Amino acid sequence: MSRRESRRRFLQSNLFGAAALGVFGSFSGRSRSRLAAAPPAARADSGGETLYNGIRLPTPWPPRHKHSFEPHAPPYLASPPAVIPIDVGRQLFVDDFLIAETTLKRTFHTTTYHPATPVLKPDKEWEKTGQNPVAMVFSDGVWYDPKDRLFKLWYMGGLVRSTCYATSADGIRWEKPALDVKKGTNVVHTATRDSTTVWLDHDEKDPARRFKLFLSHRVKGGWGLSVYFSKDGIHWNDEVVQSGSCGDRTTVFYNPFRKVWVYSLRIQSPHGGAGPSPRLPRACRCR
């Protein structure tokens, strides 16, 4: 970029009066100027919240789409901001959206399995319950906890049976500690479950709520999501709240830039013709 725009200066300035630096271009080694500012009418029509990265959300948000199996183009591609601050965190250059100019060529490499794969196996008796032996991260959570200097992992132990806990110093060799929740096992939550989200909340001020568990489970007429808190990720309090009806593969994450929790819902959608109804993602947010 020809000039560095700090996040503070960007947010304090009027976006529409900022210098246009551009966005798109080939990543083929040729220099390209940044995309000029979108026409004022295009930006003004969106009229929604301006995010930390300069992208203005359209209204309403989330957008209301008719059911379709075709992907929807993100609205900011049609009307990108004039200036995009990039000092809010690390940037992943998977496309040209943030590239002003370059002499580099993007290369994608094929991934390879680590020789230790699989690093987690159903080798405990309680992981062999249910229809099939299971020891897998089914959403759940894998975190590095700076407090204990350990990687911590929560996973499904036994098919839709319970939530288990493991730790590692390197992310490859995992230990399943014998705990006291279900004595002699590494089970930390005994409720039957589907997908589950465990979140290490670095912004939480209450130590007793440092870890959050969002557990998807059967309720009358379908599925629901229950919320639990913990100070150590092992001992969880009683259910704090339960959601309304949702699908089985429902998850949650926290957006630290916007300071909102995002609830990613799977729902059933009516389907014309024979066959089962497709299960579609939706999202809502709360502060």
Image: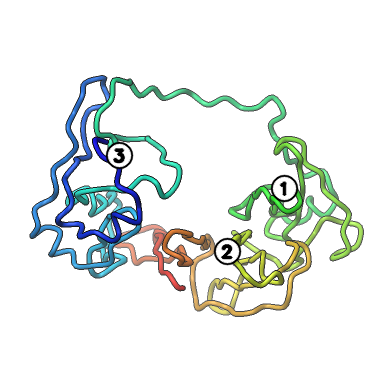
Crowding at dot 3, Cα within 10 Å, few <14 / some 14-19 / many 20+, comes out as: many
Of the two numbered discs 3 and 2 on the same chain, state the one appearing first in sequence: 3
The residues bearing labels 2 and 1 have C-alpha atoms spaced at a distance of: 30 Å
Q: Is residue 196 visible?
A: no
Disc 3: which residue: 98
Crowding at dot 1, Cα within 10 Å, few <14 / some 14-19 / many 20+, comes out as: many
Residues under numbered marks 3 and 1 in contact, where contact means CB atoms less than 8 Å apart: no
Badge nearest the viewer, 2 or 1: 2
Closest to the observer: 24 or 198? 24
Of the two numbered discs 3 and 1 on the same chain, state the one appearing first in sequence: 3
Quarter of the figure that contains the N terminus: top left
Disc 2: which residue: 203
Instruction: Say which amino acid is labelled 3.
Output: Leu
| Image coordinates for residue 169, horizontal then vertical, percent | 76, 40
Left or right for 209, reference 271: right
Q: Is residue 172 visible?
A: yes
- Rendered residue at 13%/50% (across/down): 38
Residue 33 sits in which quadrant? top left
Of the two numbered discs 2 and 1 on the same chain, state the one appearing first in sequence: 1
- Rendered residue at 48%/67% (across/down): 261
User: From the viewer's perspective, is residue 169 above or below residue 107?
Assistant: below
Residue 67 sits in which quadrant? bottom left
Label of residue 213 in the image: none
Badge nearest the viewer, 3 or 1: 3
Determine whether the residue tagged by mark 1 lies in a helix, strand or loop. strand
| Image coordinates for residue 186, horizontal then vertical, percent | 82, 55
